[in-house]
Amino acid sequence: MTPTFASCENALSLSSGKDTVVDSARSDVLFVLSCLHVGGSERKIARMANRLKEDGMQVSLALLNGPYTLEQTVRRDVPLHKLERRGKFSLRAVWKLRRMIQRERPATVVAVNLYQALYVACATLLMSNRPRTVALVNTSTFARRRVFKRVYQGVLSRFDHTVHGSQTQRAFWSTGVRADVKSSVIYNGVDSAIFEPTVAFEAGKRLRASLGVKPSGLLIGTVGRLAPEKNQEVLLEMLRRLRVARVDAHLVIAGGGPLRGRVLRRAGELEIADRGDLIADVGEGRPVA
């Protein structure tokens, strides 16, 4: 059950009568993530933290819980704080995050997606010398859970700024209150040096050859964790329909995750296993088609 801000306020007031500001050098930015498993948001934040550190900024990461698969990709001089969350919602983790913010005094605290935004909102509640808070939001649907949408709209309203991946997503979360001032859109991009057209075209030819797909065949690809929110099974159903329609189509799913076995079984049930390839975690992005 999602806690109310009143419950957070009560817990924080019981823990301490007033905030204690620790005398230390102020950091520039603190990123709050759920974990460091292999995922798009996690990879991007790890790269961003490394780059900001290279540019001379003081940056650190706070992780609600494990796994910490990508820990080795983060620079050793970028602090990692493991909050060790337990249960659906951990007031202990909120308190640890609050103390960390008081200690490091970051100019900006960035929550990477909604659940992390809840922790940041609670941890900074009633805080003196509150840092600037920014939420990066990449969720745009709450099927059959409208109450959760309303709760998180309240959470996001407490942030100084929110960043969305599209205008549609921005409109989904808008409450109509200064939305144009307190939010912005940054579209996902690719490295133009890696995905230069000629390089990508040659990589595509090599991939087709390795999979036995004709140059004239339809090659469909997707990259992402094999997890419920990615819904790769829709692509399997689509491939089945294309095959019934006698379209020479082939599907490549690049990524690993908890649903790998389920995806393989479903491909077998749909009798399309010979037209689909499941590539394990591909690591750093490279052009394949």
Image: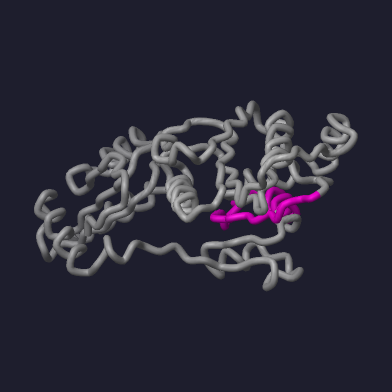
Q: x, y (%) of residue 114?
A: 62, 49
Q: Quarter holding the N terminus?
A: top right
**Position of residue 30 in the picture relative to residue 277 (left or right):** right
Looking at the image, how many numbered discs can be counted on the residues? 0
**Position of residue 66 in the picture relative to residue 204 (left or right):** right
- Residue at the right extreme of this rendering: 17
- Residue shown at 48% from the left, 31% from the top: 67
Q: x, y (%) of residue 149?
A: 68, 53
- Residue at the bottom extreme of this rendering: 180
Instruction: Using the image as rendered, state which of residue 171 and residue 33 is in the foreground.
Output: 33
Is 14 located above or below residue 136 in the figure?
Answer: above
- Residue shown at 10% from the left, 59% from the top: 214
Quarter of the figure with residue 158:
bottom right
287 is within the stretch colored magenta? no
Quarter of the figure with residue 244:
bottom left
Its colouring scheme is one colour
- Residue shown at 62% from the left, 64% from the top: 172
152 is within the stretch colored magenta? yes
Q: Quarter holding the C terminus?
A: bottom left
Q: x, y (%) of residue 190?
A: 36, 62
**Position of residue 123 in the picture relative to residue 211 (left or right):** right
Residue 230 visible in rendering? no
Residue 275 visible in rendering? yes
Quarter of the figure with residue 225:
top left
Is 36 located above or below residue 149 in the figure?
Answer: above
- Residue shown at 71% from the left, 60% from the top: 160
* Residue range of the region highlighted in magenta in the rendering: 129-155
Q: x, y (%) of residue 3?
A: 76, 39
